[in-house]
C-alpha cells in the first residue's frame, strides 16, 4: 500500500491529511500518481498543480519521474515557510 | 543535536552546552528567530507552525552534515518550535561552535538559509483579517542559492 | 551599547536586552569569541589584553555606525574584555537584532571583522615557551577587505 | 605640547608608554615627527619603522602626511590583535 500525506494548504484544500491506497493499475511514477489523483475532482486538480508544489517519497524530495513500487510514503506539500 | 518541539528553549543553556566542548573553541555564533507582530502589512496575533514529523529531522540532519563537510565545525545545535506561537516568541535556534569565527558565521547562516527553504515547516498566521497560510518568499530562495556560487 | 571592561559578561543578559526592543525584531545573531588554549602550535596558558582607552570606544562606535548605515538594524551591543584571561574565557561579545536575518548575520560578522583589524587591542600570550605578543593575521585583513567588494 | 603614546610591543621596545613633548622646530607632519624620534637611537629607529606600524592623531588613524599643530595626542602602535 502507498501511504499518502498532504500538508498545510494542501491538507486543508483536499480535506485530507493521510490516506492509504494500493498502487493504481498502470501507475509507475510519482507524476502518474499525481495525474491519477487529479481525476478525483477540480479541487485535486488545482491543489496538485499549485505553484511550487513539492513531492517527497520516503521523506525525501524527488522529481515527478521517480518510480513507485507501491509500498512508499508519498507526501505532497506547498513551499516551506519555517524558520 | 536537532530538536523539533512545542516548548520554548533557553539560549543560555544551548550556549553553555556548545561552550563545554572544550578550550579549542574560539567562536560561537548563535541565531534566534523571533515571531514578529507584522507580516505583509498586517498585524499578526498568533502563528501556528505545522511540520512533517520525521522528514523535518532528516532534512535538518542533512543540512548539518553539509555544513560540517564545508566548514571546520566543532558542534551544531538546532531547535525549531512547532504549534501555536505569539509575537516575540522564540521560533528557532541555531548555534555553531568552531575554532574560527569565519566558519562559525558561514555555517550558522547556511543552516538557516537551507532550513528556510528545505525543512518542511509551514506557518499559518492569525491576523486582524482572519487566518492565512504564509507564502514562501523568493528572498529566501535567493539566500539559499547564494551558497552554490562558491 | 559598547563596553570595554575587565569583568566577564553574561550572554543571556545581553540577549534579553536585545530582545526587549519589541515585537518588530525577527532575528538576533550573537557572536562570542572565546580564548583558545593553543596558538601557532603552542599551548597558551594565559593572555593579557591591552587597549588604547578612549580610542577603542570611538573605533567601535564608528564600526557600529557603518553597520547601521549599511543594514537595517534594530540594536547592536558590543562587549570586549581587557586584562588577564585564561583558556575558555569569554573575550568578546557582539549581538545584533534586526527585522531580517540576513541583515543581522551580515552586520554581526562585519563588526567582528572590523573590530579585529581596526580596534586598538593587543594580545600578549603566556605559553610554555614564555611570553610573546600575538602577531596580526593576514586572514583577518582579508576578511575585512571582503566587505569592500559589495 | 604633544602627548605621545606607545602601545604593546612598541611600549616595551621603547620602554615608554607616554610622554609630553613640545613640537620640535621644523616639524610639521606626523612623518617628520617620526623621523625626529628615530634620531633618539637604534631601538627608536627600528620600532618606528616596524611592519604595519599605525599612527593615530587625536585617536584617529592617519597617514604620515598629516599636519601637526603642536597640541595633539599622537599614538604609535603595532597592528591590532583583539577580538
Image (cartoon, coloured by chain):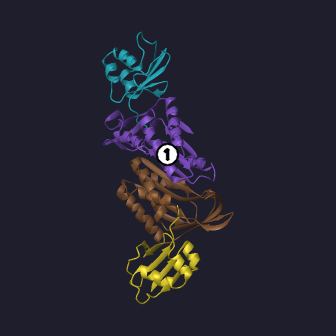
Chain colours: A yellow, B brown, C purple, D cyan
Instruction: Tell which subunit mark 1 falls on.
Output: C
Say which quarter of the image contains residue B34.
bottom right
Say which quarter of the image contains residue B81.
bottom right
Residue placed at 42% from the left, 51% from the top? B104
Q: Position of residue C82 (x, y in %)?
A: 48, 35
Residue on which disc 1 sits? C107
- Helix, strand or loop for disc 1: helix
Q: Is residue B131 left or right of residue D10?
A: right
Which one is nearer the viewer's eye here, A51 or A54? A51
Which one is nearer the viewer's eye here, C130 or A19? A19
One can see residue C85 in this view: no
Q: Position of residue C145 (x, y in %)?
A: 39, 40
Which one is nearer the viewer's eye here, A47 or C123? A47
Residue farthest right in this picture:
B128
One can see residue B36 in this view: yes
- Which quadrant of the rendered structure holds the C terminus of chain C? top left
Q: Position of residue B146 (x, y in %)?
A: 41, 55
Tell me if mark 1 has few (under 14), some (14-19) or many (20+) residues whose alpha carbon lies within 10 angstroms of its own.
Answer: many
Amino acid at each position: 500500500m502507498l501511504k499518502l500525506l498532504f500538508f498545510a494548504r494542501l491538507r486543508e484544500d483536499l480535506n485530507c491529511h493521510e490516506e492509504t491506497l494500493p498502487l493504481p493499475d498502470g501507475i509507475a511514477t510519482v507524476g502518474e500518481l499525481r495525474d491519477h489523483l487529479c481525476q478525483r475532482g477540480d479541487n485535486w486538480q488545482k491543489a496538485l498543480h499549485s505553484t511550487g508544489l513539492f513531492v517527497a517519497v520516503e521523506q525525501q524530495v524527488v522529481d515527478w519521474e521517480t518510480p513507485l513500487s507501491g509500498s512508499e510514503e508519498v507526501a505532497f506539500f506547498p513551499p516551506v515557510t519555517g524558520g | 543535536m536537532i530538536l523539533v518541539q512545542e516548548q520554548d528553549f533557553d539560549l543560555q543553556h544551548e550556549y553553555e552546552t556548545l561552550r563545554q566542548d572544550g578550550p579549542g573553541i574560539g567562536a560561537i555564533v548563535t541565531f534566534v528567530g523571533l515571531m514578529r507582530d507584522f507580516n505583509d502589512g498586517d498585524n499578526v496575533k498568533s502563528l501556528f507552525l505545522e511540520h512533517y514529523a520525521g522528514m523535518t529531522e532528516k532534512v535538518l540532519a542533512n543540512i548539518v552534515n553539509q555544513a560540517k563537510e564545508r566548514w571546520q565545525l566543532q558542534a551544531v545545535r538546532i531547535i525549531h518550535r512547532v504549534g501555536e506561537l505569539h509575537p516575540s516568541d522564540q521560533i528557532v535556534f541555531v548555534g555553531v561552535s568552531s575554532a574560527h569565527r569565519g566558519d562559525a558565521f558561514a555555517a550558522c547562516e547556511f543552516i538557516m538559509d537551507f532550513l528556510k527553504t528545505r525543512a518542511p515547516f509551514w506557518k499559518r498566521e492569525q491576523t486582524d483579517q482572519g487566518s492565512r497560510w504564509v507564502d514562501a518568499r523568493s528572498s529566501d530562495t535567493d539566500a539559499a542559492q547564494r551558497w552554490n556560487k562558491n
